[in-house]
Image: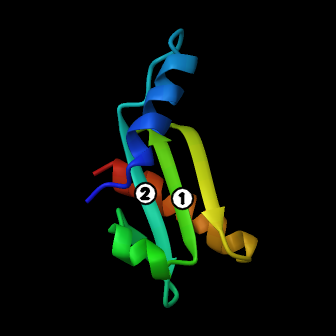
Amino acid sequence: MRHPRDDRRFGRTCAVRCSVPRPDRRCRVGYANGEYILNPTVTELKTSQMNLVVAGNRSWRDDVESEANELPEDVMLGAVVFGHQQMQT
């Protein structure tokens, strides 16, 4: 089940950047037990330390939005990289 805010965020990103190529992919990344979770369910998000959305396409990231507990910078950056790698497949 997708998070209800995904469509609003993705739509807003597309509307703001209508003069450049629009993002055609997005994914949500959670973090629990030291592992990243791709597109976590609403239930998984309740125990996740992070709720991060990456939008873009295969070659670039257009938008990153997140909510997180206190996490190290390398974990946050790793989530962005993880999300972008998953969008490339």
Q: Seen in the image, is 60 located left or right of residue 57?
A: right
Q: Residue at x 38, y 49 (%)?
A: 4
The image's colouring method is rainbow
Any mark on residue 61, and which? Answer: none
Q: Identity of the amino acid at label 2?
A: Arg
Label 1: element kind: strand
Residue 8 pos. (x, y %): 45, 35
Any mark on residue 28, and which? Answer: 2
**Is 83 drawn above or below residue 57 in the view shown?**
below
Q: Identity of the amino acid at label 1?
A: Leu
Residue 45 pos. (x, y %): 44, 72
Q: Which image quarter holds the N terminus?
A: bottom left
Identify the residue under disc 1: 52
> Which of 46 and 81 lies nearest the eye of the viewer?
46
Q: Quadrant of residue 67?
A: bottom right
**Is 63 drawn above or below residue 43 in the view shown?**
above
Q: Residue at x 46, y 63 (%)?
A: 29
